[in-house]
Image (spheres, helix red, strand yellow):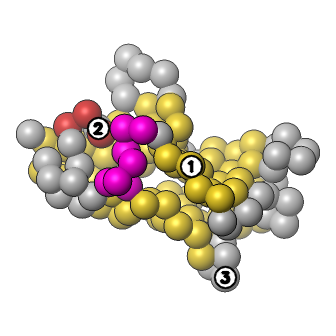
Amino acid sequence: QVQLVESGGGLVQAGGSLRLSCAASGFISGINVMGWYRQAPGKQRELVATIVSGSTINYAESVKGRFIISRDNAKNTVYLQMNNLKPEDTAVYYCNAKSSYSGVNYWGQGTQVTVSS
């Protein structure tokens, strides 16, 4: 089992910044993909950014140039730096960890990000 604990959400004005953190613990040796997803009210959960094996990075088009995902392997933590936030970024943000080899997939409890206009 893998446990994911998120932190860093909150309320911010449009144009502001927030940094989310996700600390992983447990049996993480097989995890090679970590990332962030978000779900706004009435919408499906969508990918925000992923980092594969600590190097290959993917972003949703809507956040490219504004968000930065990074991973500290020594701390088993993945970060999401969110800059120039927009009201449409308002959502619950979920940390995800998975193995593309075994198919195991874990989710954090989610952290609320609210951007006011």
Label 3 sits on residue = 74
Label 1: which secondary element: strand
Residue at 86% across, 60% down: 30
* Quadrant where the image shows the C terminus: top left
Please tell me how crowded label 2 is: few (under 14), some (14-19), or many (20+) other residues with Cα within 10 Å. many
C-alpha separation, residue under disc 2 versus residue under disc 3 = 30 Å
Q: Residue furthest right?
A: 102
Looking at the rendered structure, the kind of residue marked 1 is Asn
Q: Nearer the viewer, mark 1 or mark 3?
A: 1
Dot placed on the residue nearer the N-terminal end, 2 or 3: 3
Q: Position of residue 38 (x, y in %)?
A: 45, 38
Judge from the rendering whether residue 40 lies leftward or rightward of residue 97; answer left or right: left
Judge from the rendering whether residue 27 lies leftward or rightward of residue 3; answer left or right: right
Residue at 15% across, 53% down: 15
Label 2 sits on residue = 90
Please report the bounds of the magenta region as a residue range. Answer: 61-67
